Each structure stands twice: as C-alpha cells, then as structure tokens.
Image (cartoon, rainbow, N blue to C red):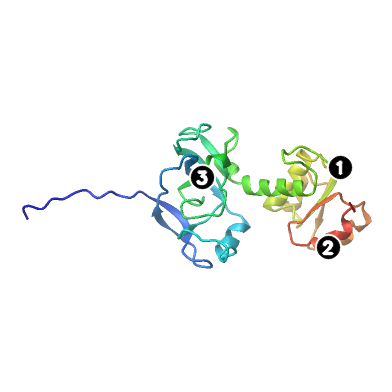
Amino acid sequence: VTGVQTCALPILATMRACYYTKHGGEVKVGELAQPPAPGMNQLLVKVHAASLNPIDWKTASGAQAMLLAFQWPRVYGFDFSGEVVAVGDKVTQFIVGDRVFGMIDGMPQRDHATLAEFTLVDASVCAPCPANLSHAECASIPLVTITVVKMLRACGLVNTAGERIGTTQPRILITGGAGGVGSMAIQLAHAMCGASYIATMASAGHKTKLCQQLGASRVIDYRTDKFEEVLAAEPLFHAILDLTDESAKCVALLEAG
C-alpha cells in the first residue's frame, strides 16, 4: 500500500521476577517491565542474590493491606546484593559497576523489591559488598542484622551508634538460636555487647552444634526440655531476645530493672 508511513515502536525492557497480583494469591514467576531510571538519590541495581524472610510471606498474605496502597503486581523481597547499573544525579558514593548490598526502605513494591533481576533502591540503604563475601552471603545479612541491632538497642545494651552501654558482660537469653535472626543474635551479642553467657534453644544435632559454633554457652533442646524450667536454677538474665513468641515464659528469668 502506497502513501502509508511506518515507525518503530519503542520496545520496553523486561525482567524476570517473582511476584503476586493480590494478597494471599498465587506466587508467580514471569516477565515484568524493568524499573524506570533511578531518581536523584537512587540506584538501579542488577540483583545477583536476594533472601527471603518470614516478613515476606506475612506481607504477601496482606498484613498491611488495610494500611497502605501498593503498586501491582508486587514483587517479593527486602534484602539484596548486586551490581550498580545506573546512578541518580545526586549520588556521589557509588558508581556504575560497584558491588552493593542492603535492605530496601519501606515495603516491597513493583519496582522496589528484590526477588527480581533489577530493583530501584535509595543509595542511603546500600553498602559496598566486602571483597571476601559472595553476593549470596551479603544478601543474607541486612534484615536479620538490623532486627538484632534494634533489639539490642531496645534492651539498653548498645546505643544508636552501636556502641556498648549498660551492663558489662551481660548474660543474655536468645530464644530460637538456630534461625536467621537467632544465629545473628548470638554473634552480635558477643561482638557488640561482650556477653559473658548466652543461652538459647535449638533442636538436637546440627542445629545445636551451629549455635555452639556461633558462641552459645548453653543450648537447650526444646523438643525434650522446657527452657523456662531448665534455666530457673541459673542466675537471672540481663536481657532476653524472644524470637519465638514465648515472652510469657521468659518473664521470671529476667533480672528486674
């Protein structure tokens, strides 16, 4: 046909992502549009590794559905590690090609989550990946570590700068020591608080050995013993980090004041 002009339509770049289209809905893996160019203080990161935590399934089930509006579909994931592929105009601490890791601020959204090939993140939540750690190792760190540090602050063991305060060489009880948060809590209780004694609970076998290797002084097999009874004869604890929703059992084990 003569007299008809044609033009090339722009092709939108796509990426693979793990997402859902409604709260409580099916987990989907497929193609979504890539995030747009980063804003002034943002980075566009090519994700090499991401980690999933209990908050991810709670979020997907609709825990905040009545409180917040979301961009659909929603992609999973808070934690990430990857490579910077684009930099916002006001970002000075990172350049394209840098290896970075971190945890998104706010809730996962369509362009702002980590179980995808690319994600948009604020530069302020990123840190350089240590040269001796893989992307998988870096992606496993942020959420659980931030959770533990906040708990240590709330217990009055460290200040906002992460500096040791309060009781010298405290005795600390950590419920659920073999989990993601628990395994990090054992290590940080030593590194940040100088804990003299750490008790925790885990199933017998390799999980008990893991807790011991990380620095637990005593590991109680929760399948055969009640920790509140086993520890009742010991001196009281200066702080208790309850990761298994058993705070009612912990009250009698905590030192007053």
Q: In terms of sequence position, does the residue under pointer 2 or pointer 1 come before the other?
A: 1
Left/right of residue 39 with respect to residue 12 in the rendered view: right
Q: CA distance from mark 2 to mark 1?
A: 23 Å
Closest to the observer, 140 or 256? 256
Residue that badge 2 annotates? 249
Can you give x and y, in whole percent of width and height, for residue 145 in the image?
A: 67, 46
Three-letter residue code for mark 1: Thr
Q: Is residue 207 left or right of residue 74?
A: right
Q: Amino acid at mark 2?
A: Lys
Query: What residue is shown at x 47% (from left), y 39% (from top)?
Result: 40
Q: Residue 50 got which mark?
A: none
Q: Reading the chain from its start, which is encountered first: label 3 or label 1?
A: 3
Residue denoted by label 3? 121
The crowding category of the residue bearing disc 3, from other C-alpha atoms within 10 Å (few below 14, some 14 to 19, many at least 20), is many
Q: Does residue 64 sit above or below 199 in this rendering?
A: below
Disc number at residue 167?
1
